[in-house]
Every structure is written in structure tokens, then in C-alpha cells.
Image (spheres, helix red, strand yellow):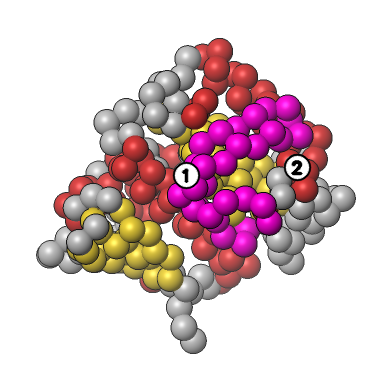
Amino acid sequence: MDKTQLSVLVNADAEQVWLMLREPARIAQWHGWEMDGLQEEIQQIYYGDDVTESDDHLRLELGMGDVFTLEPVPDGTRLTLTRGQATGEWAKYDADITEGWSVFIQQLKFKLERHPHTPRRTIFADGTSAAHTRLWDALGIDTGWLPDAGEPYKLTLTTGATLEGKVWYRTESQLGLTVADYAEHGDGLLILAQQAPVEGVREHPGAQVIASTWGLGAAAMDAIGSQWDSFMETHYPDA
């Protein structure tokens, strides 16, 4: 069986990318989002007894067989995660784990390319919808009219917010957007993720919102958080 591979081209040399994978403080700037227990999760995933790293700092093998490889290329470093096969109680979460890694490596790329020296602050919201609501429909996003990755966009969402920036990446289930209002200097990153029903995990479609911000004050953070909390409570209330 072919293993799933997730890959991004990072505009940085392999040494910088390796440090993002091996220093706890740097990992916390792209892995997941701010939450209680993040440091413990990082220790478990990246520093467990079953974690091995190559002498040339181009290969990192995690638990469950997940493997990071770094390939220096003319434009930077090709970072690839080859997924292992989740077993036992984790098997039913395998698709969600893959989707999570897809988010994380995009956040790593964004952090290293756009805000390598500034701490991030994150807003996270998730839930499920008994109404089988598609996230794009709930937000009023016509993905058929969105430009390609790297191209500028401007959207007015059903939340009333107007977002502007560039499309960072697109997959069938995820949309990454740079957002000018999510950073004091430069831009921030908004990732919207649709989740399909999974037997034994969630009965109805789910959604995740991960907003990575830089340099915003408390009032701006509260406004963004309130906006997304209100949206999720309306459309995906089973948080």
C-alpha cells in the first residue's frame, strides 16, 4: 500500500528547517495552536523513545512510523512528511491525523518564511454540525471563484468580516489564506478545514478554524476570537 505523503517547499535552507523540527520553542510556533498541554504533546511526539534522527539532519522518524525528510533544492528545502499507519485505538483517527499534519506543515512554512523572529498568537475553534453544513457554504465562500495559491483575494464572509490577502494553499478539505488584519506587520494566516463524518469519532461534518496572528493587541485578538466563536456556535455548535 502506498503511504500518504505531504510536502511543502520552504524558502529556507535545510538547517533552518531542521531547527524548526528539533527545538521545542520553535516547534511550539507552528505545531498545533495555543492550548493547555501543548508542551507535553510536543515532548511526546518529537522527543519520545521511539524518535530517531539521522546524522546528516535530513531525516526525522517519529512514532507510528511518521517520517520527515528534508531535501535541499535550488529554491530552499523540500519538506516531506511520509505518514505511518496508525494502529489500535488510533486507527479511527488516521484521516484526521493526516489532515492535522497538513495544517501543521503549512504553518511551519508560513512561520519560517513570514515571521521567523516574532512569536505567534493563535485562535482555534472547532465543532460539528447536525445540519450537515459545508464550511464553505456557511462562510459564503464560493471556492470555484477563488484564485489559485499565491494569487490575491478579497472575501466578505457571512460573519460580516472582510478578509484580504493571498491564497496560501488549497486542498479539497482545507483553505489557507493570508490575512492582512491578522498581523501588525506583514500578514497572518487563517486555515479553514472541513472534516467529514468518521464512524466512532463524529457522526456529523465538522469544521476547524485556526487563526495564526503576529503582533496584535488584546482588543484585536478578542475581536477575532469573538467573531469565530460566534460563527462556530451558530453553525457548528457541538464543540
Q: Is residue 165 above or below residue 42?
A: above
Would you place residue 74 above or below residue 162 in this image?
Answer: below
State which quadrant residue 118 falls in. top left
Q: Amino acid at mark 2?
A: Gly
Label whose residue precedes the other's in the sequence (2 or 1): 1
On the picture, is 117 further left or further right than 64?
A: left
Quadrant position of residue 49 = bottom left
State the extent of the magenta-drawn residues as a range.
Answer: 144-173
Assess disc 2: are there few (<14), some (14-19) or many (≥20) residues with their C-alpha within 10 Å of its C-alpha: some
Tell me the kind of residue under disc 1. Answer: Gly
Q: CA distance from mark 2 to mark 1?
A: 26 Å
Q: Which residue is mark 2?
A: 140
Nearer the observer, 50 or 210: 210
Q: Quadrant of the C terminus?
A: top right
**Relative to 1, 58 lies left or right:** left
Secondary structure type for disc 1? loop
Q: Secondary structure at mark 2?
A: loop
Q: Which mark is residue 32?
A: 1
Res. 92 visible in picture: yes
Q: From the viewer's perspective, is residue 52 above or below residue 195? A: below
Determine the residue positioned at 45% across, 49% down.
Answer: 150
**10 Å crowding of disc 1: few (<14), some (14-19), many (20+):** many
